[in-house]
């Protein structure tokens, strides 16, 4: 396997590892959201059995925290979606550039073959001479 193929294989492996880590992060987010919802409901039950003024303040604070946490989760989700979209765009661009590179390499190889065949042929095009007097062909 040539160096280029090794690099491509490494990049693909990194891309797969990145996709897998994104999937793990998504599962963790779901678990975190579920545990936060459970904690919020427990806080509400505890608040129902205390001082009404303090309970009211505590509920307001809990609601503010809940809203803030939800907004933070939404921002995080949006940011993650943007990163995934950027990764897809970059992968498409890499694929496009690789195909262009292959075309340019093929063209360069063709030009090298043409140059090689020209070097192998007469150094002077037909009908031209190198400045030495031409000798008539010998007749036998």
Image (cartoon, rainbow, N blue to C red):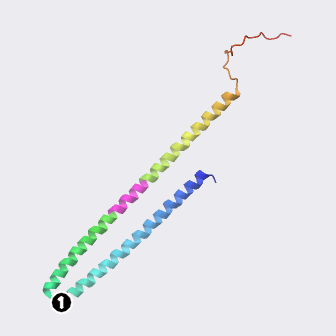
Work out whether residue 61 or residue 16 is closer to the camera in this orientation and state it. 61
Residue located 23% across and 83% down the image: 44
For the N terminus, the image quarter is: bottom right
> Taking 133 as reference, is 56 above or below it?
below
Work out whether residue 133 or residue 19 is closer to the camera in this orientation and state it. 133
Left or right of 1? Residue 138 is right
Residue 85 shown in magenta:
yes
> Taking 83 as reference, is 111 above or below it?
above
Residue at image mark 1:
50
Left or right of 78? Residue 123 is right
Residue furthest toward the bottom?
49
Q: Which element carries disc 1, helix, strand or loop?
A: loop
Residue located 23% across and 86% down the image: 45
For the C terminus, the image quarter is: top right
> Taking 113 as reference, is 40 above or below it?
below
Residue located 44% across and 52% down the image: 90
Magenta residues span: 78-88
């Amino acid at each position: 396997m040539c160096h280029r193929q090794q690099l491509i294989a490494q990049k693909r492996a990194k891309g797969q590892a990145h996709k897998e880590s994104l999937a793990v992060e998504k599962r963790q987010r779901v678990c975190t959201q579920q545990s936060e919802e459970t904690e919020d409901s427990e806080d509400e039950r505890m608040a129902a059995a205390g001082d009404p003024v303090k309970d009211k303040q505590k509920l307001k604070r809990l609601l503010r925290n809940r809203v803030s946490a939800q907004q933070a989760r939404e921002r995080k989700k949006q940011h993650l979606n943007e990163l995934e979209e950027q990764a897809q765009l970059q992968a498409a661009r890499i694929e496009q550039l690789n195909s262009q590179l292959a075309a340019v390499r093929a063209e360069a190889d063709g030009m090298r073959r043409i140059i090689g065949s020209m070097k192998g042929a007469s150094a002077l095009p037909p009908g031209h001479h190198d400045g030495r007097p031409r000798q008539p062909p010998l007749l036998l």
